[in-house]
Image (cartoon, rainbow, N blue to C red):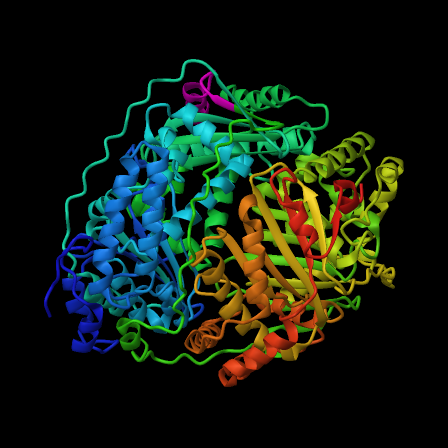
Amino acid sequence: MQTRIEPGVVPGYVNPLEIWRTNPTQTTNVTTAKIAREFPFYSMPGDPIQARIYKLKNGMTVMLSQNKIEPRLQTYIAVRAGSKNDPKETTGLAHYLEHMMFKGTSNIGAVNWVREKPILDNIAQLYEKHRVEKDPLKKKEIYAQIDKISQNAAQLAIPNEYDKMISSLGAKGTNAYTSNERTVYVNDIPSNELEKWLILESERFHQLVLRLFHTELETVYEEYNMSQDRDGSKVYKELMKALFPTHQYGTQTTIGEGEHLKNPSLNNIMGYFKTYYVPNNIAICISGDIDYDQTILLIDKYFGHYLPSPVPPFIAAKEAPLLTIQRREVMGQEAESITMGYRLPGANTKEITTAKLMLGILYNGQAGLMDLDLIQQQKVLNTYSYVTELTDYSVFGLVADPREGQTLEDCEKLLVQEINKIKNGEFDEWLIKAVINDYRLAKTKSYENNSSRASAFVDAFIKGIDWRLYMTELDRMELLTKKDVVDFAKKYFSDNYVIVYKRQGEDKNIKKVEKPVITPVEANRDIESQFLRAYEPIPSIGTPPEFINFNQKISNQNLKSGVPFSYIKNDLNQLFELYYILDMGSENDKTLSLAINYLPYLGTDKYTPAQLQQEFFKYGLSFNVFTSQDRTYVSLTGLESNLPQGIELFEHILSNVEADETAYKELVEGILKEREDAKSDKNSILNAAMANYARYGELSPYTDRLSENELQKMKPEKLVQKIKSLTGYQHRIFYYGQKPAEEVIQVMEELHKTPAELTAYPAPKEYPELATSSNKVMFVHYDMLQAQVVMMSKDKNFDKTLLPAARAFNEYFGSGLSSIVFQEIRETKALAYSAYASFGTPANFDEAHYVRAAVYTQADKMQQAIEAMQEIMNTMPKAEQQFEQSKEAVVKQIQSERITRSAIFWTYENAKRRNLSYDVRSDIYTATQKMTIDDMQQFFDEHIADRTWSILVLGDRNKIDINYLKTLGEFQELTLEEIFGY
């Protein structure tokens, strides 16, 4: 084997296929003792996730955690570099690079690299020429050259080949993200595909090839323009600018400056890759069903040959202290709010540990000062606090949404008052221990899943925190006293904060990045690289699927009262979940959800509302009641050792809750304000109000709610009686925990009192779904840069025989980075950042399947985007190789899927809603293996093609071509009042 060195290639590269051919075995007989000598690791006694931290000879960090709950692996490849490392003249570069890492190498995605490379070099030179050119006309001429030459380069490229290969392994969640100081590449893969994944990633990370750059650049433009429409993004940018006027946290954003995006430097991108994408600056983080020894051997086999390179140290700018309050203002269409931020020391400091403790005392979602003083007492509409840990500095943030008639300045005063309570020591000492216990409980819960474990690895690596210190932070927190918290607050929290007032109105500072003229490139779907052809036959050890036998996994019996009791044992930890389930919701009784929303603000004859929250928090428990259209749930979760106290407390609440006139009045005011705020939220308008209007018409489960007049006339005592009567209705109980079922039943028999005869549910109101009988366009005006388009069409009622084809269609055609929609709309035509299509499965047997397609694009590209989507939704691109890869992806996903723990019960509940009594994945698995491209074509012709559509469009009428929309069908401009029903 010979190593190869050329520009854009990490030194020490060896073709991973050659490595596999030389040593194809997936396992080794090397003794554990020898492996331990060759690959020493750090592990921490008592580590709940049994992490092993390795360092390869080339400096690459490997962090592994074994979790055999299912045969899958959550993988993150983390690079310790982000937007703070961007050259100041080409910001957004780290994010660009992240996008380009999906474009392949000289092997992946290449038809003929020898011919392609000189063309790409020429394009890179033209981009440099374009960047320095000042004359706008000459810049356009240069870009026209780039576009023309890019057509030639595209003939030699295979778009999305990496995505096809990773999908064929059965990968899920394939993605990447960039932030201030990290770039992370994400895959969730079957454990038996570890070696093939390493072969693929070893190849990907050895070389950066900037192919199909100009179409991807347009995608980044779209992302930038999307951020201009998101008020939250604008607030964050303004907050960081004011907190860090000197440091790159504030002077540079991850998306980059608009001017820099229009003038990229491919040379700088290559330079960034060469500098930071080196083994000694990368961590491979894996959690899942692994063998530690075999895994480290395989990682070294495919990554150990890369040569290290010194990474220049980042010199953090020293910020001068903030001596006065810095006030900033952001305008936008969404609801008003404030965001306050205090600058703190960086991660891996004692101060940050104290800051997290202070955070929990201030806000924990249950019994913090802000929870009880501001949320429960309804002094603001909503509020929360957070800590953002970064390496050089950190941010302690507070957010509040105003109530009707409340000014943003009023909210600011309330938040400052809560901070002052910490500084004055106005909090109970028991809260410190309770907060730490709550953090421990949250960690225990989070470490049930691989994503949280592997994310912890990424976090520790990026921040440079020793794993022992990372995992023992709560131990150190326990050493902190109330005085430590008070002293910390006095030191860091004064009139030294930044506050951003997010006001409602026109933003006159929006800077749109204009679209360049781009000629669509070919998808080349039927071409495969030599690398892929050699890669596909590499065998994997098969994993048989496991389907759930619900009767075996769920223990069902009745309490003496006749209440059904379902039980699943928790073999993992000391946490429990208890649910009372009522098969009725807002469709049965419109006032039910109002009563449930009222409950958190009420006390009993024994406890105030605050005392109830505090009691649950002391015991490490959470109590909740929530309702949907057709279900109501009363839940208790937390530490099983405190189960009896928890049941006794929540049974006490349900029996002894007392009405509060003032609390109800404030609740109604809050509901009305939230309703108004929803009318300025893009997601609520399009995906809730408009989607329901298209599905049901004027009267829908979404619009059929209590009117303002009904709310104001409602008697609080009536709502209290409704709460007290909940367990008098027919209901059932589900328990997940370590205690034996008999012991739990004994507790329930003692504490869960029900009447001799349970009340039947009120009949539900029915909302017929409308047939999509003709093409209709429903438009709602919203001041924004983008046009968001959703196409909906009703199919037949639930049919389980459609499920195999639906899953295969969604994999092949509709979603994911290798799908037909992604290729056609984004990759080859650069028409949108976000586009998808799906054949949806309803939750209930008496509801319809829906075909949906969506594209979020710039207003001036809307027509092109709709036409492109309509074309592929009527004529399915038939790519047999890609279809076979999609089939393989579905099969491997099902083979490695494991439904475990309490999810077994909820899967059974979902099956019953569809009149199924078994795990329907078995049908999908069998049928998918037999499916042909002709079967998919038949499904497409019968259920996708030539449909009539409800086309929902949200955008600015002054930027959108309304006349074009009118050509698509019966046009209707809807008001917010029509679609929201108020």
**Looking at the image, which is closer to me, 754 or 222?**
222
Q: Quadrant of residue 628?
A: bottom right
Stretch in magenta? 482-499
Which residue is the extreme one toward the left?
A: 2
870 to the left or right of 343: right
**Looking at the image, which is closer to me, 510 or 486?**
510
- Reply above or below: 978 against 774: above
Residue at (36, 50) in percent of width and height? 214
Residue 168: x and y, percent?
40, 72
**Looking at the image, which is closer to me, 790 or 141?**
141
600 to the left or right of 923: right
- Reply above or below: 1 against 210: below
Give the position of the N terminus as an image quadrant: bottom left
- Reply above or below: 67 against 78: below
The answer to whether residue 483 is magenta is yes
Residue at (49, 54) in percent of width and height? 445
Q: Quadrant of residue 345?
A: top left
> Chief secondary structure of the magenta span?
helix
Does the rendering let one see residue 803? Answer: no
Residue 572: x and y, percent?
48, 63
Residue at (45, 13) in percent of width and height? 324
Residue at (29, 37) in percent of width and height? 131
Residue 29: x and y, percent?
19, 77
180 to the left or right of 43: right
The answer to whether residue 430 is magenta is no
Which residue is the extreme one toward the top?
A: 324
Does the rendering let one see residue 178? Answer: yes
Q: Quadrant of residue 364?
A: top right
Residue 387: x and y, percent?
45, 35
481 to the left or right of 129: right
- Reply above or below: 480 against 928: above
